[in-house]
Image (cartoon, grey):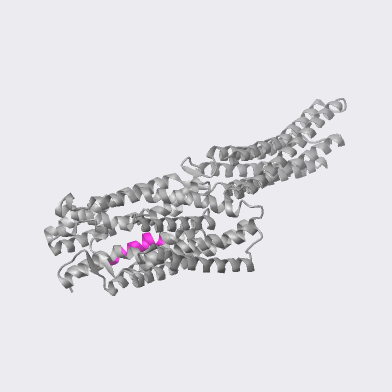
């Protein structure tokens, strides 16, 4: 086997591990924090579903250069693609591990984009970078949290109005809880079609997946609640209903995350594999199934080894996040990401979730949010691309001299 | 990722309820001291009054902890100043109970006239009501936020605040009645006894005064 391929595979695994440790744990954190599931259950759900998402639903064709951030026609030497992929992957992994160490939720996509741009600039100067695409990525830092906040603000207001602001909250909870959960599943069904099955047509997604799933879930939830409302106190009852709903929504997030973000770890591996086996790359290269499996496995191991510790801390600490709030955050984030992928905007899930938390805070829904941490998170978003780019540029330079 | 643990700061409401628990126990213990005083049982009274002093210390400590945790860097559902002032007022309820206990201990009771003693006892019982209502009010405030400031929950909170105000009113009335009684009995009492009774009454009525101030703050918290 080509030694470079072997090196890339090892770093690809490390990247997958870092994605599992940082990002995948994020997908379950609202559920763990709101005590819908224990950390142990979260690890099992996330581990299995991240792997399933990556292996069964990961794209079988991947871009050699993530999001077309570089102009591929300017790379004539295939070895540049090899060195570059190694540099970008290693840089993204290093940054992710640093971010995880400091507990910052950063976008793995942004890290890999920064890494790719970094080696591109060293190789061919700034003109190789597709600045239009880069502009979109930068815009997504700003757009994702703002849209997430606005969405969560309004969903939270309407949500509480529909359930708690009634003469008989228990009665309205019986009707409105299934409605909200059903609505969330319309979004989830559609997202499943677009993100997991990689479908393109929104109408097909909504009509064939979203609406039928939503109706089924509404009917099932309605019947379950009709049979037995969890408590005579509307607050405890509603929280109990949404606790169960949150288990399913977070499971979905893990599946979609595996299907999508595995590309960040295995895209460069697939590119190097194409060069090693066929001698050249192109805009897109096929991804062998074993590489997908490797990516999925890496993420699952990341969740089990480091993500577990993280979720355990979350499970012990966040007690202020109730299930209705956790559900509103998940629901808002999913809706925003769906709308964004329909409009073709690059929106980061992690950023949207943080925005949604702030939106609920602005709607006076969360008792206390740490503004310092919000500031740290925003700074970490701004440094992700440049830092990953600089590390990648340095590694690439060394590889070009040595190789 | 650990950011999730830090992003959501600890809500001040659970500790505020804990503080209210201690304040309520303080007032209840004071009432026991008053009953012992009513029965001219100095030893019993001393025991309970000392306990009031200890409980007030516990409340103080919780108050300090809450203050330390309420950094200005928090984004909260209610204004930070409202929470701090509310806490201050709730703590004053325990302070007032401690003041009463201090006055009780000043001298050995030589059994004041029955009429006066029963009014003092009644004031004590009413004070417990006030402290209980404050506790109820802060628990309800937690629910108001939980419901996303739903009208129904706000209305329930207003009802509790109204009850606190009416208890305060009642104690005020008892206080006035007592002052009059003391002067009517001026001939049969020493000036020391008079001063003693009047100060016990004044500190006792302070309990519900502060309870009312705390309730006022909750009213402000609910304003949008």
Q: Magenta residues, as a range?
A: A12-25
Q: Is residue A95 visible?
A: no
A369 relative to A98 in the view: left or right: right
Q: Where's residue A133, x and y in %?
A: 26, 53
Q: Quadrant of the C terminus of chain A?
A: bottom left
Q: Is residue B218 magenta?
A: no
Q: Where is A243 relative to B73, above or below?
A: below
Residue B148: x and y in percent read: 57, 49
Q: Residue drawn at (46%, 58%), measured in percent from left and top?
A: A330
Residue A281 appears in the picture as rendered: yes
* Location of residue B65 by image quarter: top right
Residue A17 placement: quadrant = bottom left
Q: Is residue A380 left or right of residue A70?
A: right
Q: Which quarter of the rendering shows the N terminus of chain A?
A: bottom left
Decide if residue A144 is on the left or right side of residue A165: left
- In the displayed structure, does residue A349 sit left or right of residue A41? left
Q: Check residue A13 for magenta coloring.
A: yes
């Amino acid at each position: 086997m080509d030694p470079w391929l072997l090196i890339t595979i090892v770093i690809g695994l490390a990247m997958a591990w870092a994605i599992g440790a940082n990002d995948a744990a994020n997908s379950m954190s609202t559920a763990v924090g709101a005590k819908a599931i224990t950390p142990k259950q979260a690890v099992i759900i996330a581990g299995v579903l991240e792997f399933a998402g990556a292996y069964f639903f990961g794209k079988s064709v991947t871009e050699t250069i993530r999001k077309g951030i570089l102009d591929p026609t300017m790379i004539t030497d295939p070895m540049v693609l090899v060195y570059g992929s190694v540099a970008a992957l290693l840089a993204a992994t290093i940054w992710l591990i640093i971010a995880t160490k400091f507990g910052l939720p950063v976008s793995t996509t942004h890290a890999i984009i920064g890494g790719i741009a970094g080696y591109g600039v060293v190789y061919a100067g700034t003109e190789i970078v597709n600045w239009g695409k880069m502009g979109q990525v930068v815009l997504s830092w700003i757009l994702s949290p703002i849209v997430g906040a606005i969405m969560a603000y309004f969903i939270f207001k309407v949500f509480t109005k529909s359930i708690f602001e009634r003469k008989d909250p228990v009665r309205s909870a019986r009707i409105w809880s299934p409605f909200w959960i059903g609505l969330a599943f319309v979004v989830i069904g559609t997202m499943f079609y677009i993100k997991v099955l990689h479908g393109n047509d929104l109408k097909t997604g909504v009509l064939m997946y979203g609406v039928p799933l939503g109706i089924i879930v509404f009917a099932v939830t309605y019947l379950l609640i009709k049979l037995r409302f969890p408590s005579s106190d509307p607050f405890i009852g509603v929280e109990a209903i949404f606790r169960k709903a949150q288990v399913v929504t977070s499971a979905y997030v893990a599946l979609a995350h595996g299907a999508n973000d595995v590309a960040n770890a295995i895209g460069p591996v697939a590119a190097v594999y194409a060069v090693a086996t066929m001698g050249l790359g192109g805009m897109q290269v096929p991804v062998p199934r074993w590489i997908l499996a490797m990516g999925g496995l890496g993420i699952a191991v990341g969740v089990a080894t480091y993500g577990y510790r993280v979720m355990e801390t979350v499970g012990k600490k966040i007690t202020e996040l109730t299930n209705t709030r956790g559900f509103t955050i998940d629901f808002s984030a999913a809706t925003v990401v769906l709308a964004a992928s329909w409009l073709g905007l690059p929106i980061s899930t992690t950023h949207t979730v943080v925005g949604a938390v702030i939106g609920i805070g602005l709607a006076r829904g969360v008792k206390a949010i740490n503004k310092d941490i919000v500031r740290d998170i925003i700074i970490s978003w701004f440094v992700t691309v440049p830092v990953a780019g600089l590390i990648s540029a340095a590694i690439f330079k060394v590889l070009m001299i040595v190789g | 990722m650990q950011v999730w643990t830090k992003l959501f700061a600890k809500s001040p409401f659970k500790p505020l309820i804990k503080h209210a628990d201690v304040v309520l126990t303080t007032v209840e213990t004071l009432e026991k001291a008053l009953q012992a005083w009513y029965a001219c049982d100095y030893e019993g009274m001393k025991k309970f009054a000392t306990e009031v002093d200890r409980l007030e210390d516990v409340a103080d400590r919780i108050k300090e902890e809450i203050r330390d945790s309420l950094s200005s860097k928090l984004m909260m559902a209610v204004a930070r100043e409202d929470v701090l002032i509310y806490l201050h007022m709730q703590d004053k309820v325990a302070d007032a109970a401690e003041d009463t206990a201090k006055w009780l201990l000043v001298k050995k009771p030589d059994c004041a006239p029955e009429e006066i003693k029963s009014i003092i006892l009644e004031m004590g019982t009413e004070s417990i009501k006030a402290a209980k209502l404050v506790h109820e009010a802060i628990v309800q405030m937690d629910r108001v936020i939980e419901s996303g400031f739903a009208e129904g929950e706000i209305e329930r909170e207003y009802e509790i605040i109204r009850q606190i105000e009416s208890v305060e009113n009642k104690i005020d009335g008892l206080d006035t009645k007592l002052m009059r009684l003391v002067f009517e009995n001026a001939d049969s009492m020493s000036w020391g006894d008079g001063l003693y009774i009047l100060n016990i009454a004044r500190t006792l009525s302070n309990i519900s005064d502060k309870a009312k101030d705390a309730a006022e703050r909750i009213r402000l918290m609910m304003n949008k």
